[in-house]
Image (cartoon, rainbow, N blue to C red):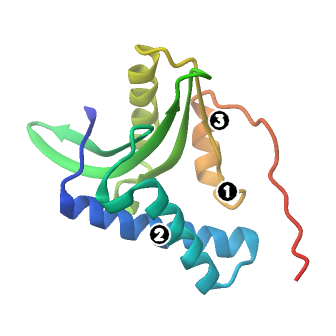
Amino acid sequence: MISFRDLNTHEFLEYKNCFIDEYSQELSENYMYSKDKSLVIATHDFKTSFEDSDINQNNHLYGIEIDESGIKELVGYIWYSIDEEKHCAFINDFYIFPQNRNQGLGSMSLLHLESILSKSDIWEIKLRVAYTNKSAARLYKKIGFTETGINMNKILR
């Protein structure tokens, strides 16, 4: 069974390191930024969203936990924000630990989020997936997400 729970301080710091590492790598790969520039951007984006370990009211960060016969295990993270005026949620980050992938936990986690949000006044879930992350794109399509556009950029310098 999948559930979401708040992160403790240690887990929050682990998530911070994971997010900054993964996001800076994505920025380097997809936007051709230097590793240093990517690290600065990723760190800044995290700090502006989670100042002093405090989640602002629009952000929801949870640990994804499975319960197998009474044994609970943290298997990933999900961070989403809510835009109440647009009745929309945006998945900012979704991460299943590498050792827990390809077990159906990604699908179960997203369907669990959908169940939670559908009980509130949220009508739509959006996200962005890097073009290099083919396995994530397949997962999202499998559970009903559709492509709505293509992000593009052109490096001038």
Q: Quadrant of residue 14?
A: bottom left
Left or right? Give the position of 13 relative to 139: left
Between marks 1 and 3 in the image, the one whose residue lies nearer the viewer: 1
Position in image of residue 106 (x %, y %): 44, 42
Which tag, 2 or 1, sits closer to the chain's start?
Answer: 2
Between marks 2 and 1 in the image, the one whose residue lies nearer the viewer: 2
Q: Disc 1 versus disc 3: distance between alpha carbons?
A: 14 Å
Checking the image for residue 20, the label placed there is 2
Q: Disc 2 versus disc 1: distance between alpha carbons?
A: 15 Å
Q: Are marks 2 and 3 in contact (CB under 8 Å)?
A: no
Image: 157 above or below 64: below
Which tag, 2 or 3, sits closer to the chain's start?
Answer: 2
> Which amino acid, mark 3?
Lys
Position in image of residue 3 (x %, y %): 27, 34
> Which amino acid, mark 2?
Ile
Q: Quick one: SS at disc 1? A: loop
Q: Which residue is mark 3?
A: 141
Checking the image for residue 130, the label placed there is 1
Residue at (53, 62) in percent of width and height: 45
